């Protein structure tokens, strides 16, 4: 059935295609999770797929207008923008999602460790900062305070110097007694410690070989005497010549001399003391074989005379000019601390020992009371006159560094370095020949940081019993005179004795 143009009608308004939600809708279209995003993607894909026209006849009869195609493109573009916005919103929600419990625990542990470490750091740092502050305060205080130095006065030396030197005592006379004949010891009469007189019998020897020689010499002498007397008794003139008579006389006299020599040797069977003294050695026993020799180890006895002793002392070179024969000395024995023995310089060697630069000097010491024994160590005290005035200072007052010897003088609380010329060294004190007059206050153990003109605070050394907190301890008894140590008395020693 044919239709006319009047019969043409507009397409129905009821479009079978689903209606899209408005872009400005208040409803939140963002997917909540991954499943929703997947469903939304499937929906978009389904929407993009071509849909069959509800009325094919209408589309064939009426082609779409250009405005409709533009609307479709805009609609597709709007859908794509919505899809991108939904994906961005989902990613943002995923980032804003709170962390899990495990991650939260790890962060809490790390935070606790940091807090503990910070606390420990503060605990160790605060005391150190406090100490540094105190040190700075003390350093500032010390910088502003004056340097404290210990001072001692330089003492004027006395007119005489008392010097004590070690000595070795020996007997005035001593000798070894040897045998003068070969034989055996028949008996001995004196032992060590016995006091003997000159010529006193010490031992008796048995000399059998010498006795036989004496008997033979007697027989030869008798034969020579008989022959000489027979020749001399011939009265006939011219019967014998004068020569024969002289030969007989000479033979007789020779035999007499031989016998006298053997009798003299036989007399050496008696061993006697050469001088009066004390027997200090006995090296024989009954039956000992002895020989007429003075070889080492063959001595029978040793006798020493101890009424007077000799003290041998080595005088250092710097004291030699003051030593003169006849000078009186004092002999000090450690075993007799409360007694002094008088002595006198007898002689010296006349030349110094090249190795020790000392002069061997002999001092005679009377020993009438027999208290001194040969071989004792002793101290010989000399009173030596001082040739020129000098000053004595403590050995600790010398400045350890520098080319020339110097001391540090404190005057009006100011430092001044003074060059000196040292003399004799007394051990703990030193003699100053030039540079000081005496009475100057010298710094003890000066430090290198002291400078000329520096202001200081001078203090005198405290005694041991004045130090705070010090306790008096009993001192062990000391040997008043050490035989192995030379000693020179100083002014400080004289003050202590007073």
Image (cartoon, grey):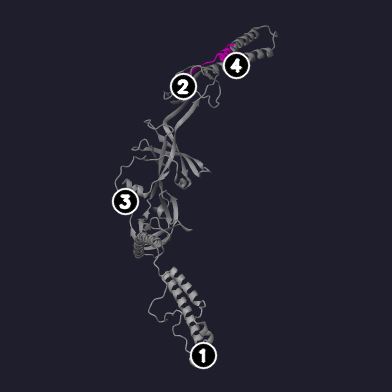
Expressed as whole percent of the image width and height from the top left, the position of residue 255 reads 61, 14
Which mark lies nearer to you, 2 or 4?
2
First in sequence, mark 1 or 4: give its number: 1
Please tell me how crowded label 4 is: few (under 14), some (14-19), or many (20+) other residues with Cα within 10 Å: some
Local SS, label 4 = helix
Provide the residue designation for mark 2.
199
Q: Tell me the quarter of the picture where residue 497 sits.
A: top left
Residue 431 lies, with reference to residue 68, above or below; the image says above
Instruction: Inspect the magenta stretch and tell me whether residue 94 lies in it.
Output: no
Query: Residue 219, percent across and down?
Result: 60, 10
Which badge, 4 or 3, comes first in the chain's sequence?
A: 4
C-alpha distance separating marks 4 and 3 = 85 Å
Q: Position of residue 460 (x, y in %)?
A: 33, 56
| The label number, if any, that marks residue 258 in the structure image | 4
The residue beneath circle 1 is: 3
Labels 1, 3: front one: 1
Mark 1 to mark 4: distance in Å? 208 Å
Q: Which of labels 1 and 2 is toward the front?
A: 1
**Real-space Cα separation, disc 2 to disc 4, in angstroms:** 26 Å
Q: Secondary structure at mark 2?
A: loop
Report the side of 429 relative to 57 (left or right).
left
Circle 3 sits on which residue?
Answer: 463
Q: Secondary structure at mark 3?
A: loop
Task: Reply above or below: 345 against 391.
Answer: above
Which label's residue is closer to the chain start, 2 or 4?
2
Sequence order check, earlier mark of 1 and 3 = 1
What residue span does the magenta drawing correspond to?
Answer: 201-215
- Residue 13 picture location, percent across and down: 44, 85
């Amino acid at each position: 059935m044919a239709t006319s143009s009047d019969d043409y009608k507009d397409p129905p308004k009821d479009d079978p295609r689903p209606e899209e939600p408005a872009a400005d809708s208040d409803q939140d279209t963002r997917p909540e999770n991954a499943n929703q995003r997947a469903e939304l993607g499937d929906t978009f894909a389904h929407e993009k797929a071509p849909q069959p026209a509800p009325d094919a006849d209408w589309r064939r009869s009426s082609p779409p207008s250009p405005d409709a195609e533009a609307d479709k493109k805009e609609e597709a573009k709007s859908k794509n923008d919505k899809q991108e916005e939904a994906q961005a919103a989902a990613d943002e929600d995923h980032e804003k999602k709170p962390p899990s419990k495990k991650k939260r625990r790890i962060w809490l542990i790390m935070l606790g460790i940091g807090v503990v470490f910070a606390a420990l750091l503060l605990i160790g740092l605060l005391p150190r900062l406090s100490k540094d502050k105190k040190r700075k305060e003390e350093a500032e205080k010390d910088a502003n305070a004056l340097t404290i130095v210990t001072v001692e006065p330089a003492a004027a030396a006395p007119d005489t110097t008392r010097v004590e030197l070690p000595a070795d005592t020996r007997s005035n006379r001593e000798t070894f007694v040897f045998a003068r004949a070969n034989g055996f010891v028949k008996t001995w009469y004196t032992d060590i410690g016995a006091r003997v007189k000159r010529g006193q019998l010490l031992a008796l020897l048995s000399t059998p070989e010498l006795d036989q020689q004496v008997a033979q010499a007697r027989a030869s002498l008798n034969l020579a005497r008989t022959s000489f007397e027979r020749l001399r008794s011939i009265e006939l003139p011219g019967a014998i010549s004068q020569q024969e008579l002289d030969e007989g006389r000479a033979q007789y006299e020779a035999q007499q001399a031989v016998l006298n020599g053997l009798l003299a040797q036989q007399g050496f069977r008696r061993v006697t003391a050469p001088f009066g003294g004390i027997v200090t050695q006995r090296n024989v026993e009954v039956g000992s074989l002895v020989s007429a020799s003075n070889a080492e180890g063959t001595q029978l006895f040793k006798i020493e005379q101890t009424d007077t002793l000799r003290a041998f002392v080595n005088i250092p070179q710097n004291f030699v000019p003051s030593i003169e024969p006849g000078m009186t000395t004092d002999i000090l024995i450690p075993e007799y601390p409360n007694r002094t023995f008088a002595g006198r310089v007898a002689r010296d060697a006349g030349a110094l020992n090249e190795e020790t630069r000392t002069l061997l000097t002999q001092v005679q010491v009377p020993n009438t009371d027999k208290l001194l024994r040969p071989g004792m160590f002793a101290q010989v005290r000399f009173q030596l006159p001082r040739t020129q005035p000098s000053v004595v200072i403590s050995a600790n007052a010398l400045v350890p560094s520098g080319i020339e010897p110097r001391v540090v003088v404190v005057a009006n609380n100011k430092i001044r370095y003074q060059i000196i010329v040292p003399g004799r060294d007394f051990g703990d004190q030193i003699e100053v020949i030039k540079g000081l007059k005496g009475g100057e206050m010298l710094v003890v153990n000066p430090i290198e940081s002291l400078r000329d003109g520096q202001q200081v605070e001078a203090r005198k050394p405290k005694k041991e019993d004045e130090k705070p907190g010090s306790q008096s301890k009993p001192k062990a008894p000391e040997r008043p005179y050490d035989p192995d140590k030379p000693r020179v008395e100083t002014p400080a020693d004289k003050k202590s004795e007073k």
